[in-house]
């Protein structure tokens, strides 16, 4: 049976009210538990941050694809298999702590764009999206440009066929 009395420290027992959010302590005093939104802890998996960052990076004009050539080839094959899904986190690696996160991105840019401008825009978009959605501080976004998509190159994904 739950004890519904609380010790106020004045020598008299008083009825504990749930709306006052108090609990009995061993020293005889009362302490405030806190607001419901502050009770407990929220953890965010690395994969969640990777997906957010991957989608935000792909939204930037000048980013042709994410990941290395091999990762894109395997990803294209995986997408063609029934039940296979597109990997939005391809080319993104996140390290998530309790309050901060760091990101590594590997991108392919379109030929003719200023790579430094694309990298700046990717950083701004990724930092904004991750911080807005997770409340984590993004301490760094490292970008590796692994390839340039030339206009005359055919899409690698269209060449990959399963027989």
Image (cartoon, helix red, strand yellow):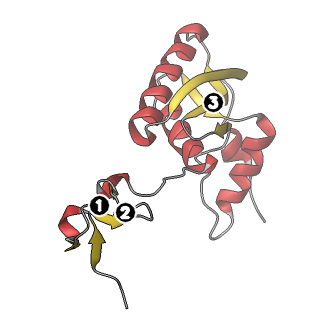
Query: What is the quadrant of the C terminus in the image?
Result: bottom right
Q: Which residue is mark 1?
A: 9
Foreground residue, 145 or 28?
A: 28
Earlier sequence position, callout 2 versus callout 3: 2
Image depth: mark 2 or mark 3 in front: 2
Mark carried by residue 102: 3
Residue 119 placement (x, y as % from top left): 57, 16
Foreground residue, 103 or 54?
A: 103
Q: CA distance from mark 3 to mark 1?
A: 49 Å
From this viewpoint, is residue 15 visible? Answer: no
Q: Is residue 72 above or below residue 24?
A: above
Q: Which residue is mark 2?
A: 28
Foreground residue, 43 or 61?
A: 43
Residue visible at 48% across and 17% down? 121
Q: Secondary structure at mark 1?
A: loop
Q: Residues within 10 Å of mark 1 (few under 14, many from 20)?
A: few
Q: Is residue 113 above or below residue 71?
A: above
Residue 40 placement (x, y as % from top left): 45, 57
Q: Residues within 10 Å of mark 3 (few under 14, many from 20)?
A: some
Q: CA distance from mark 2 to mark 1?
A: 5 Å
Left or right: 16, with 50 as reference point: left
Q: Secondary structure at mark 2?
A: loop
Check contact, mark 2 vs mark 1: CB within 8 A.
yes
Q: Secondary structure at mark 3?
A: strand
Q: Residues within 10 Å of mark 2 (few under 14, many from 20)?
A: few
Earlier sequence position, callout 2 versus callout 1: 1
Foreground residue, 138 or 119?
A: 138
Q: Is residue 27 above or below residue 50?
A: below
Residue extending furthest toward the front: 11
Q: CA distance from mark 2 to mark 3?
A: 46 Å
């Amino acid at each position: 049976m739950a004890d519904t009395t609380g010790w106020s420290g004045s020598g008299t027992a008083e009825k504990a009210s749930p709306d006052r959010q108090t609990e009995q302590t061993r020293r005889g005093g009362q302490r405030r538990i806190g607001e419901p939104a502050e009770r407990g802890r929220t953890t965010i998996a690395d994969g969640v941050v990777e997906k957010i960052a991957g989608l935000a990076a792909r939204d930037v004009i000048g980013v042709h694809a994410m990941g290395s050539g091999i990762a894109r080839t395997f990803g294209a094959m995986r997408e063609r298999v029934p039940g296979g899904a597109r990997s939005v986190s391809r080319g993104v690696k996140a390290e998530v702590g309790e309050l901060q996160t760091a990101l590594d991105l590997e991108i392919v840019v379109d030929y003719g764009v200023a790579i430094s401008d694309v990298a700046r825009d990717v950083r701004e978009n990724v930092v904004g999206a991750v911080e807005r959605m997770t409340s984590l501080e993004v301490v760094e976004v490292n970008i590796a440009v692994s390839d340039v998509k030339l206009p005359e190159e055919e899409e690698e994904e269209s060449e990959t066929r399963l027989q």
